[in-house]
Each structure stands twice: as C-alpha cells, then as structure tokens.
C-alpha cells in the first residue's frame, strides 16, 4: 500500500538534502533528486524496522533555552 508523504528538500554544497515533513527524524541526502528519493525511502524503512523490532533505545527529552534573534 502506498501513502503520500511530503519530501521537503534543498541543495547544500551540491547535494540534495531532504526530510519527510510528516515523520520527524527521517532525513537523507543524494547527489540528485532521484537518489534523494531512494535514500529517504530507505531511511523511512529503517525507522519502521527499528520501531518494530525494539532495537531503538527509548528516547529521552529535555527542555533547553536558546537565544533567538
């Protein structure tokens, strides 16, 4: 089954870098847009696999203060 996701991407030092807006933590890069799409799909699948097999450690959170302009 396919599900639509939003790939937000930009160029950085000649690389296409992107993230899935709907899934925090899924980032990747590629030499071109096609490679980025392939790599972001791999990153998404790896996230799903790590969630399902319990191999990912429990995440912790901490509030921090940052100076903003």
Image: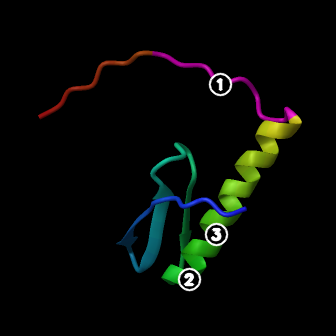
Q: Whole-Å distance between the Cαs marked 1 and 2?
A: 31 Å
The part of the chain drawn in magenta is: 54-62
Numbered label attached to residue 59: 1
- Which mark's residue is nearer the viewer, 1 or 2? 2
Task: Indicate yes or no whether the magenta region holds residue 69.
Answer: no
Numbered label attached to residue 39: 3
* Quarter-of-image position of residue 13: bottom left
- Circle nearer the N terminus (3, 2): 2
Task: Indicate yes or no whether the magenta region holds residue 55.
Answer: yes
CB atoms at circles 3 and 1 under 8 Å apart? no
> Chief secondary structure of the magenta span?
loop
- Circle nearer the N terminus (1, 2): 2
Residue at left offset 46%, top offset 67%: 17
Q: Position of residue 37 (x, y in %)?
A: 57, 73
Residue found at the far top of this picture? 63
Q: What secondary structure is marked by label 3?
A: helix
């Amino acid at each position: 089954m396919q599900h639509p996701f939003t790939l937000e991407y930009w160029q950085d030092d000649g690389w296409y870098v992107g993230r899935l807006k709907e899934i925090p933590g899924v980032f990747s890069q590629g030499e071109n847009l096609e490679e980025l799409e392939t790599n972001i799909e791999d990153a998404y699948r790896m996230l799903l696999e790590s969630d399902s097999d319990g191999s990912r450690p429990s995440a912790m959170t901490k509030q921090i203060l940052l100076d903003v302009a």
